[in-house]
Amino acid sequence: MFENRAIVVTGAASGIGKQTAIDFARQGGMVAVADIDEKNGTDVVAKLKSDGRDAIFVKTDLTVEADCENLLAITTTTFGRIDVLVNNAGIEISTPIHEMSVDEWDRLVDTNLKSMFLCSKYALREMMKATSGVIINLCSVGGLVAWPGIAAYNATKGGVMMLTKSLAVDYAKYNIRANCVCPSIIDTPMTDASIGHDAAVKEQKAKLNPVGRLGTPEDVANAILFLASDASSFITGAALTVDGGYTAL
């Protein structure tokens, strides 16, 4: 489905980003795996190459403009184009607002929102030349409703939502689409860091979703690949919930 298409996936050393990179590559895409985690990122690429897939790893601090510019430049030089950008990288900090330091706030905003601005900035320049492209941003149900206890995280994801809609409106004339995916709790290393590995806790969290289970990286990757595909050519500015019915309650 994605033969001869060049795809950049940020935060692709683990979790949703890793699964997304793998799925794009398995469907013929040429994938740039971007992450600050060099060991796990290179492991992802090594596995893809051993399976005969076309992939590169670019060590990237996504909060630094020069790194983001370098990521998109290397991708363009290596693959000759940029067809899809998946802005996946993100973190969660649960410090209450009245106790949160400015450094914590800045780290959340820089990782969850600024990184998407920076990567989109340089991807758009290539996509505009080609008059074609897709940007998919990882938002969250926390960008749609106020998840308790993580106000700053919710604020960044609300920003992602509006950035996505604005990109869709501003760049439609270049045949560039922008959408976001809004997962609920997904069973990933990031979730383990947040709620722990306790099975009873995970079961309790799973009950928040009407379908009665946590989401998987595959669930989210499936939505991302759909939004990147020609099957969604009339979809832009949308927020696709992948939440097991959480926001339908």
Image (spheres, grey):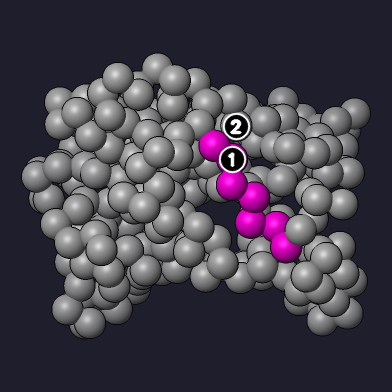
**Nearest the eye: 41 or 245:** 245
Task: Find out whether residue 208 is within the magenta segment.
Answer: no
Classify residue 67 as left or right of residue 204.
left
Q: Residues within 10 Å of mark 1 (few under 14, many from 20)?
A: many
Mark with earlier residue (2, 1): 2
Q: Is residue 72 above or below residue 193?
A: above
Q: Secondary structure at mark 2?
A: helix
Classify residue 147 as left or right of residue 83.
right
Q: Amino acid at mark 1?
A: Ala
Q: Is residue 200 above or below residue 118?
A: below
Q: Which mark is residue 239?
A: 1
| Dots 2, 1 in contact, CB < 8 A | yes
On the image, the x and y values in percent for residue 192 come to: 70, 68
Q: For residue 135, what is the image quadrant? A: top left
- Image quarter where the N terminus lies is bottom left
Q: Residue at x 40, y 47 (%)?
A: 232
Q: Is residue 58 visible?
A: no
Q: Residue at x 72, y 63 (%)?
A: 244
On the image, the x and y values in percent for residue 238 come to: 54, 37
Q: Is residue 79 visible?
A: yes
Q: Amino acid at mark 2?
A: Met
Residue hosting label 2: 161
On the image, the x and y values in percent for residue 130 come to: 15, 31
Q: Residues within 10 Å of mark 2 (few under 14, many from 20)?
A: many
Q: Secondary structure at mark 1?
A: strand
On the image, the x and y values in percent for residue 89 come to: 50, 48
Mark 2 or 1: in front is 1
**Nearest the eye: 166 or 103:** 166
Q: Which residues are magenta?
A: 238-244
Q: Residue at x 40, y 58 (%)?
A: 225
